Image (cartoon, helix red, strand yellow):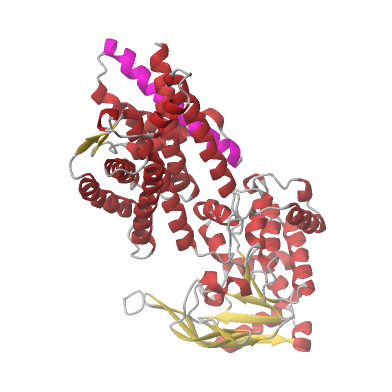
Amino acid sequence: MYDYFIFSVQEGLLYGILALGVYITFRCLDFPDLTVDGSFPLGAAVFASLVYRGFGPIESMIAAFIAGALAGLLTGVLHTFSKIPALLSGILTMTCLYSINLRIMGRPNMSLSENLGHRTVFTMLRDSFSGIPESYLRLFFLIGLIFLIKILLDLFLQTEIGLAIRATGDNETLVEAQGINPDRIKLVGISLSNALVAFSGAMFAQYQGFVDINMGIGMVVLGLASVIVGEVLLRGRIILVITLQVIIGAVVYRLATATALNYGYSIGFKPYDLKLFTGLLVIIILSFPVIKAKFRRVK
Amino acid sequence: MLQLEHIDKVFFKNTPDERWALRNLSCVVQPDEFVTIVGSNGAGKTTLLNIISGNHFPDRGRVIIEDHDVTSLPAFRRARFIGRVFQNTTQGTAASLTIEENFAIAYAKGRTRGLHLAISEHLRKIIREKLAEVGLGLENRLRDRVGLLSGGQRQALALLMATIGNPKILLLDEHTANLDPKTAEKIMNLTNLLIRDDHLTAFMITHDLGDALKYGTRTLLMDDGGIVLDISGEERKKMTINELLERFSERRHKKFANDRVLLSTETKEG
């Protein structure tokens, strides 16, 4: 019981990085970005293939981050330069990435194993702090990591470029009238978003010890679910609270799905029902305001 | 100074819906001139402002601001010359950002935006001073989201944001039309003050013929994509609303048709 709680929180924190990325596109830029389903495994694939080639985990994670940014850049260019609608731009990049990810890995899945001599941040961590139980060590490390990312993102979103990103999804006319090229701002935002998503993928690969070509399926919806669960829970107005609520949303969402998996068997819930569960959760939360408004009018 | 030379703007060109929004329109406006624009619906008033701002590109002709030919520059590239306030009070500000964040976006206009924090204590002081001058009590609400403000407050903010970067030209598209009369007057006074103090070349579209003559230094009457009446100086000072309407019918051999204009002049006289 306790174990599953701690593992779910760890996974939730890993997904939190992805959710922060999704928050930038969905909420700041108002750009529904489906690239995520491809850039998440891209980060994992780049990480694993570099570790296989003998690179250390830190530089491989940086490479994954950059690869994600490039994937986002492609989607951004498709949308701003070729004027392809947002959803289609993301789908196109995602589709291309499926083949690219297979190319990078050279096979549909790779395992990261100490027996094969692969090092990850988690093995490094364990070697440096041998006195602390590993599950706690991982938990503390992940909390520290996500707060570092959160603080950096908070600062970035309060810079001049950051403000422009947040204003673009809100009022593009204003952004243009204030001398900002909205296309360029979208490129920056979508790249950063997918860089975070790929980084999350690289972290996840190390955490679970393997990479699978299909590990990205449903990640957009998972990120969106985290963002809106967080919004329901905290309703933050300032950026410091909003990024916190995205992380909390990811953890709570992960706990909810883990609970569904652990105790759902009594009502016949199977692991493959998870995507349906996520989809329904998002549908319910997104529909709730409309249903509430209708209900009020009837009364 | 702004020069418009032989501007044509055609929408849906070469289709059955082809519509000429502007037809061979030329006009020179000097610094310190405050031009009010009136005309019936579809006369081309908003299209004219869009051509100046770069939101539309003309099919023919040139737009020259301060000796720079900006005809083919997109809106964000000529934004440093131009401030703009719209009729829709939600268009001039970003609702999800705070008052100070909105200001910071406007304050960085004309510069390359970088990776340093957008808001400093120095900027806060400037914002507070600017807002205190307006007298709407906003100077103590810098960290409130703009979405919480009333239409009048948002419009005042939009005006300050449009003028803070020292533009040459201010474009006002019926910016008081959605406000109650008292607030509208406040916003008009602020507008006048900003235009005078910053020596702006200003264009204001209005549907109120009284306002068109009351404010500004020059009045353009537009119809069918062109300027049919251009009055300024002594002639304008003596002009009444009725004379303006008469002059229009003389020129165009038709009545000045605009429900909103008629309505607003009737209520004034009645």
Left or right of B150 on screen, residue A102: left
- Residue nearer the viewer, B176 or A68: A68
Is residue B212 placed above or below A186 in the rendered structure? below
Is the N terminus of chain A in the top left, top right, bottom left or bottom right quadrant? top left
Q: Residue at x 61, y 40 (%)?
A: A238
Question: Mostly what secondary structure, the magenta segment?
Answer: helix
Quadrant location of residue B86? bottom right
Estimate the x, y position of residue A135 in percent, counting from the top left.
42, 20
Give the residues drawn in magenta, as a range: A239-267
Quadrant location of residue A215? top left
Camera sees residue A298: no
Left or right of A203 on screen, residue B111: right
Is residue B88 placed above or below A221 in the rendered structure? below
Q: Residue furthest left?
A: A107
Q: Residue at x 67, y 76 (%)?
A: B168
Left or right of A38 on screen, residue B108: right
Q: Residue at x 33, y 42 (%)?
A: A47
- Residue nearer the viewer, A29 or A63: A63
Q: Residue at x 61, y 59 (%)?
A: B92
Estimate the x, y position of residue A45 in percent, counting from the top left.
28, 43
- Residue nearer the viewer, A48 or A2: A48
Estimate the x, y position of residue A195 in percent, counting from the top left.
41, 47
Estimate the x, y position of residue A282 in percent, counting from the top left.
38, 32
